Amino acid sequence: MGKKTIFIVLIATLFNCVSALESKAQSFQEGDWVLSAGFGLGHTFSYVGSGGLPLGVGAEYGITNLNTGSIGIGGDLGYTSFNDYNVMTIGGRGSYHYSELVDNKLDLYGGLGLYYRSFNWSTGEGTSYSFGSGVYAAFHVGARYYFTDNVAAYGELGNNWGWMNLGVAFKL
């Protein structure tokens, strides 16, 4: 076999695999559990300065289906560390999923949440300070694209633990 034939066979095989994965994908609905993990681009607080990479995990459960989508509830946990600062964010949120308005691989959603943010600063001499901590309201809009029934990439804009969060989601 020549290199050109091997290349054509590989491309055809890849195309068939992607087509098979896409045909099985489903969006978010009642009874679904989705776990997510990702990183943030730009943190939502000013005390830490311009550095630090926000990391976060979340879970969501589909509580009901509606005519044009579904409603989910869940929570997030985020963490950022930069120099001597550490920030922990934890909270709950609700989302409306517009899954019936688009194809079954794309899950568009938006919602509101309530979070607690804890700021800590360590002097390096064994002294630690907590400041600026408190409860705040948050918003989010995002999308998940399902490559398979259970695996999606997601992108989200909001003010929970990062202004723009990117990552992977797993439907259980």
Image (cartoon, rainbow, N blue to C red):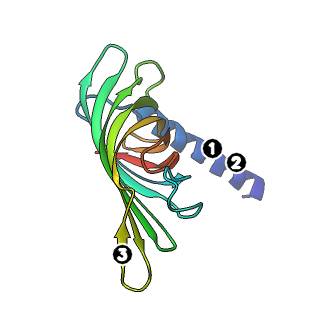
Point out which mark residue 128 bears.
Answer: 3
Q: Quadrant of residue 2?
A: bottom right
Q: Name the residue under label 1.
A: 12
Proximity of marks 3 and 2: CB atoms separated by less than 8 Å: no
Secondary element at tag 3: strand
Cα distance between the residues tagged 1 and 3: 59 Å
Q: In which quarter of the image is residue 121?
A: bottom left
The amino acid marked with disc number 2 is Ile
As drawn, is 143 to the left or to the right of 96? right
The amino acid marked with disc number 3 is Ser
Residue farthest to the top, as pictured? 67
Q: Is residue 119 above or below residue 170?
A: below
Proximity of marks 2 and 1: CB atoms separated by less than 8 Å: yes
Secondary element at tag 2: helix
**Of residues 63 and 115, which is closer to you in this image?**
115
Q: Name the residue under label 2.
A: 8
Q: Quadrant of residue 131?
A: bottom left
Proximity of marks 1 and 3: CB atoms separated by less than 8 Å: no
As drawn, is 105 to the left or to the right of 36? right
Point out which mark residue 61 bears.
Answer: none
Q: Which of marks 1 and 3 is nearer the N terminus?
A: 1
Residue 58 position within the rendered picture, expressed as x and y whole percent measured from the top left: 34, 49
> Which tag is nearer the camera, tag 1 or tag 3?
3
Quarter of the image for the C terminus: give it.
Answer: top left
**Going 35% across and 55% down the picture, which residue do you hit?**
133
Q: Earlier in the sequence, mark 3 or mark 2?
A: 2
Secondary element at tag 1: helix
**Of residues 70 and 158, which is closer to you in this image?**
158
